[in-house]
Image: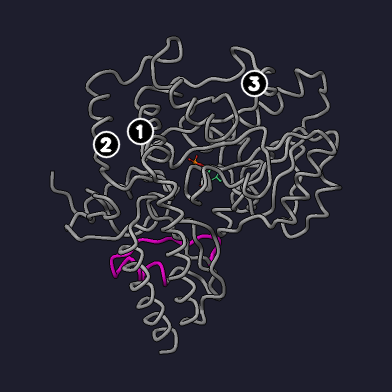
């Protein structure tokens, strides 16, 4: 089927609910870190479907496993057993130290499950007043009612009020705020170890220490939302332990399926003991296709040496980005770890993102003035070099335009 961008745009304008402002390009094929549009033009993909296509596009082992699985058995529901949930869960347990997993289909659902499990834990303990949540200013955890309630941005929240009652937001720049906000009525604190949508902002060591203290002092559960920062993106399985945090629950998604929708809530044994059949569920959650994809990804991450690869690639990436920032004064700061990077600009990032796309490089804008870079975990140094060269030209070109 040959389609043009214009055909697709015209049909979408009539029939797609307009919840997204899309960029004017339609992709039909991918290979590794490259995408190809309807006109056959090649792009270097430094956003990977917002941190999802962790193994790059059309990864041979993922493709082979999915093709075989699609031809064998796709779905049976959670009424029955199949081989891949347990295997994916065991691998996640080994990486996280949290022994049990609940599978779902997205990051939002993973967060939603964590919030419910935290409430359920205290309900089972008989502490029925422990229902409150503490979340972080700048945090993003999804857009269902529960996950939106712990997402900070008023732009997302305001039209849907009232949201969950009893959520307090604290400023991650103010560790002392935690001592007041986290009390013996708090069910859980939820935090992204590195805020993703909020502009690639790692929690400071001071804030992480205060968070650990507040949770220990009050017995509050800690939910690490590692949907974006987890599963190798930083060169570590998870970023919470790097900050000295030991979460009771972790939400994962994005990278886990390499492009197939699968998420999971990872749960400590003490929380798991509070959960009974019927407390939560999902028809599709943990289906054969999703969990088989997760097994392939997790195998690549650990046995395939991907974690070590990201560590090395991340060092190279950081060096190149810091050199870039020295050349272009509009870049105020380079943030992030591994292959999760953000360039804090002095101005709106939109023209830079558009110019990069025009030059065949896909990046995105987040928190208005941040250029976000989330290449596949498999990214090679030569492609990092190429991307930084394009960015160099982009910053030079947009600066000239701004002066003209
Ligand atoms: C930290 C974090 N949590 C949750 C979500 C929601 O995940 P999803 O869009 O897969 O539902 C996102 C998405 O960007 C995220 O970055």
The residue lying toward the viewer, choosing from 85 and 78, is: 85
> Nearer the viewer's eye, disc 2 or disc 3?
2
Q: Residue at x 54, y 24 (%)?
A: 102
Dot 2 falls on a residue whose secondary structure is helix
User: Residue 165 in magenta?
Assistant: no
Task: Look at mark 2 in the image and give the residue it sits on.
Answer: 61
Q: Position of residue 94 (x, y in %)?
A: 53, 31
Q: Is residue 139 left or right of residue 4?
A: right
Crowdedness of circle 2 by 10 Å Cα count: few (<14), some, many (20+)?
A: some
Q: Residue at x 65, y 22 (%)?
A: 269
Q: Position of residue 52 (x, y in %)?
A: 41, 45
Which residue is most to the top?
Answer: 80
Q: Locate residue 396: give its quadrant.
A: bottom left
- State the colouring used for the structure image: one colour
Task: Look at mark 1 in the image and give the residue it sits on.
Answer: 296
Dot 3 falls on a residue whose secondary structure is helix
Q: Residue at x 38, y 29 (%)?
A: 290
Q: Is residue 329 left or right of residue 155?
A: left
Q: Residue 272: which disc?
A: 3
Which residues lie in the magenta part? 352-369
Q: Earlier in the sequence, mark 3 or mark 1?
A: 3
């Amino acid at each position: 089927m040959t389609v043009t961008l214009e055909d697709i745009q015209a049909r979408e304008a009539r029939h797609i609910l307009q919840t997204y402002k899309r960029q004017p390009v339609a992709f039909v094929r991918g290979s590794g870190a490259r995408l190809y549009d309807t006109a056959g033009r090649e792009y270097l993909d430094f956003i990977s479907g917002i941190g999802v296509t962790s193994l790059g596009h059309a990864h041979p082992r993922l493709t082979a496993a999915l093709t075989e699985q699609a031809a064998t058995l796709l779905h049976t529901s959670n009424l029955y057993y199949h081989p891949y949930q347990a295997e994916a869960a065991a691998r996640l347990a080994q990486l996280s130290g949290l022994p049990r997993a609940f599978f779902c289909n997205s990051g939002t659902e993973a967060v939603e499950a964590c919030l419910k499990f935290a409430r359920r834990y205290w309900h089972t303990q008989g502490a029925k007043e422990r229902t409150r949540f503490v979340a972080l200013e700048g945090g993003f955890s999804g857009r269902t009612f529960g996950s939106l309630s712990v997402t900070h941005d008023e732009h997302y929240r305001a039209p849907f009020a009232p949201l969950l009652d009893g959520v307090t937001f604290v400023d991650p720049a103010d560790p002392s705020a935690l001592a007041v906000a986290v009390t013996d009525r708090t069910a859980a604190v939820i935090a992204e170890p590195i805020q993703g949508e909020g502009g690639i902002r790692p929690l400071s060591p001071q804030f992480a220490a205060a968070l650990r203290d507040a949770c220990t002092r009050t017995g509050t559960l800690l939910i690490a939302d590692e949907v974006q920062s987890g599963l190798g993106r930083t060169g570590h399985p998870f970023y919470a332990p790097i900050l000295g945090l030991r979460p009771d629950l972790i939400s994962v998604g994005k990278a886990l399926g390499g492009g197939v929708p699968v998420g999971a809530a990872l749960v400590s044994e003490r929380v798991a003991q509070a959960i009974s059949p019927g407390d939560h569920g999902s028809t599709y959650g943990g289906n054969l296709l999703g969990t088989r994809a997760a097994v392939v990804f997790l195998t690549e991450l650990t046995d395939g040496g991907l974690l070590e690869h990201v560590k090395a690639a991340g060092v190279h990436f950081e060096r190149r980005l810091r050199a870039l920032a020295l050349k272009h004064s509009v870049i105020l700061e380079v943030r992030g770890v591994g292959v999760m990077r953000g360039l804090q600009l002095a101005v709106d990032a939109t023209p830079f993102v558009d110019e990069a796309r025009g030059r065949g490089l896909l990046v995105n804008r987040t928190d208005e003035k941040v250029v976000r870079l989330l290449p596949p975990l498999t990214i090679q140094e030569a492609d990092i070099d190429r991307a930084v060269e394009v960015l160099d030209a982009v910053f030079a070109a947009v600066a000239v335009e701004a002066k003209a």
